[in-house]
């Protein structure tokens, strides 16, 4: 299988087409496309196009074109592996060749080079391929072949909106890859002038017209996924981009933008239902976002950030059941099965668990399509783009925004560590609910430590601290999984009368009871080691 890991990584990166930042579109700069995509329910494009939200901003009736675009790549898909797409689009008698590349600066943007060509076939000499990517020094037009085709009826309209100009394109059509077909019904909002906040604002206006969904895949990403039968990969959090020179205001934007990028990157994997890790990483991204909001709100009382936190919490809660059943079916049961507890038939328990697991995944899909979820995603992007917290806090708190991020970070880490130590007092005698609260605080402490890691020079001390924190979290997580399993087993027990299912339930409860007893002393040792570890931010 050619370059599978590279393929998956690029599909995950290509899934993200918008994120935060206070950017304007610079004139006469490198060719950059800035756009936001929204999926529309089939058959609704005409109604959206005729809505007051569009008509009141439209300069004219726009233009309607039928576009056929053929995407080309090498036999081993080197362009896709490099994060590039190459297409030739026909509109009437005219042909346009386009190369797109993910921007190194921000996933909202893509570098874009276009040139007219004479036919629907690549002409690499028509574009400055040497400046685009070194890969074109190794391949020529003869190495390229069609991979998939998009056929679209596009109605494009120029819009004058407050603080900017947008081109809105209503695309109705099909992606075709051999015998495979996938319909297209989407709206593209491309920024022509102004800051990207105008895209989010207008997207929210359209949400009042129809239940649209944020689309995080480009047409090329969807086409490659269809042609190569790829599944979207889960994406872990990237390295924090905060630096010692940042003010608190700049640091807040970077923290929230990083969390937003991870959320967007995992929406497709969570939606598919074929990648349990996608749901897990989406929950992690939401927890990281809520941790960042918690830290910010300790110093800055912001109704806007509080509302975002409530939305993130609601979204994460709807992902919880699917994740719990995934862990039970994919991790807990296989671990116990390895002990070969004959004649226990764990397959019967797995089969009885499957309807609950599917119900959880159905709830995830419903949540991802829920207008409330998509409004939250757009509001988060808008808050980041226009730095909404600046106008949402008390005037006496504005001075905090100008403080060095290092001061804010040390204050936040001190507060979380103090809270963790307080919750862990008399650790051996903590009740399960108290231990769960400690575990949540330790998660926040770990995310915060990762957020602020670039601000501290002694990376060795930081890694040592994070290692001890991670090991403590792991064993607390194992204990929490046992408690969660009891609730899941109760649901199965009430739904099935099959003797084999109940024997397996008994075996799981017995096994986990043994694990809990065996892990009690190990948990105490890890807590003591963590307490003895010097915080890296105090050195």
Image (tube, rainbow, N blue to C red):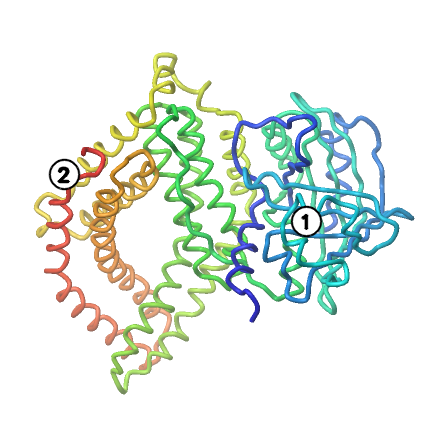
Residue at the outermost bottom position: 343
What residue is rendered at 13% in x and 60% in y?
522
Q: Residues within 10 Å of mark 2 (few under 14, many from 20)?
A: few
Circle 2 SS class: helix
Circle 1 SS class = loop
Dot 1 crowding, Cα within 10 Å, few <14, some 14–19, many 20+:
some
Mark 1 — residue?
A: 41
The answer to which of 46 and 157 lies nearer the viewer is 157
Pointers 2 and 1 in contact (C-beta within 8 Å): no
Residue, disc 2: 422
Q: In the displayed structure, would residue 448 be above or below residue 402?
A: below
Image quadrant in which you'd find residue 493: bottom left
Lower position in the chain sequence, tag 2 or tag 1: 1
Question: Can you tell which quarter of the image residue 137 is in?
Answer: bottom right
Report x, y in % for residue 334. Answer: 33, 74
x 25%, y 34%: residue: 413
Q: Which mark is residue 338?
A: none
- What whole-number distance in Å separates the C-alpha atoms at marks 2 and 1? 51 Å
Q: Is residue 243 above or below residue 394?
A: below
In the picture, measured across the screen, residue 286 lies left or right of residue 97, that is left
């Amino acid at each position: 299988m050619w370059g599978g890991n590279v393929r998956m990584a690029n599909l995950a990166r290509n899934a993200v087409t918008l994120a935060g930042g206070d950017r304007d579109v610079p004139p006469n700069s490198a060719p950059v496309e800035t756009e936001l995509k929204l999926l529309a329910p089939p058959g609704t494009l005409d109604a959206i196009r005729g809505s007051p939200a569009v008509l009141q901003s439209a300069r004219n009736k726009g233009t309607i074109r039928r576009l056929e675009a053929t995407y080309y790549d090498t036999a081993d898909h080197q362009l896709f592996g490099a994060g590039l797409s190459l297409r030739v689009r026909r509109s009437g008698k005219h042909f346009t060749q386009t190369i797109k590349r993910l921007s190194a600066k921000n996933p909202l943007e893509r570098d874009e080079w276009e040139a007219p060509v004479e036919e629907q076939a690549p002409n690499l000499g028509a574009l400055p391929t040497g400046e685009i990517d070194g890969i074109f020094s190794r391949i020529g037009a003869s190495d390229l072949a069609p991979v998939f085709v998009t056929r679209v009826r596009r109605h494009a309209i120029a819009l004058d909106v407050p603080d900017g100009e947008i081109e809105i394109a209503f695309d109705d059509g099909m992606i075709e890859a051999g015998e495979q077909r996938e319909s297209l019904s989407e709206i593209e909002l491309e920024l022509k002038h102004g800051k990207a906040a105008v895209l989010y604002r207008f997207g929210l206006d359209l949400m009042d017209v129809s239940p649209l969904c944020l689309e995080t895949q480009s047409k090329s990403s969807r086409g490659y996924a269809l042609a190569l039968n790829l599944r979207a990969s889960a994406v872990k959090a990237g390295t924090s981009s905060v630096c010692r020179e940042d003010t608190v205001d700049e640091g807040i934007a970077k923290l929230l933008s990083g969390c937003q990028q991870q959320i967007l990157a995992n929406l497709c994997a969570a939606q598919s239902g074929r990648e349990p890790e996608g749901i897990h990483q989406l929950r992690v991204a939401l927890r990281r976002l809520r941790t960042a909001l918690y830290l910010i709100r300790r110093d800055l009382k912001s109704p806007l950030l509080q509302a975002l936190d409530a939305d993130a919490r609601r979204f994460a809660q709807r992902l919880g059941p699917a994740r719990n059943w995934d862990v039970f079916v994919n991790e807990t049961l296989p671990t116990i099965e390895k002990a070969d507890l004959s004649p226990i038939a764990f397959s019967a328990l797995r089969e009885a668990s499957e309807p609950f697991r599917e119900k959880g995944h159905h709830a995830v899909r419903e949540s991802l399509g829920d207008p409330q979820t998509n409004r939250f995603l757009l509001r988060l992007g808008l808050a980041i783009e226009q730095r909404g917290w600046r106008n949402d806090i008390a005037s006496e708190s504005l001075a905090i925004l100008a403080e060095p991020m290092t001061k804010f970070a040390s204050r936040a880490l001190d507060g979380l560590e103090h809270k963790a130590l307080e919750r862990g007092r008399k650790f051996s005698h903590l009740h399960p609910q108290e231990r769960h609260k400690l575990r949540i605080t330790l998660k926040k402490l770990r995310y915060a430590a990762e957020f602020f890691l670039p601000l501290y020079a002694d990376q060795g001390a930081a890694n040592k601290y994070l290692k001890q924190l991670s090991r403590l979290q792991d064993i607390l997580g194992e204990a929490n999984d046992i408690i969660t399993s009891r609730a899941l087993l109760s649901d199965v027990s009430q739904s099935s009368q099959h003797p084999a299912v109940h024997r397996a339930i008994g075996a799981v409860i017995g096994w986990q009871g043994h694990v809990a007893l065996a892990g009690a002393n190990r948990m105490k040792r890890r807590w003591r080691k963590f307490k003895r570890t010097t915080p890296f931010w105090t050195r």
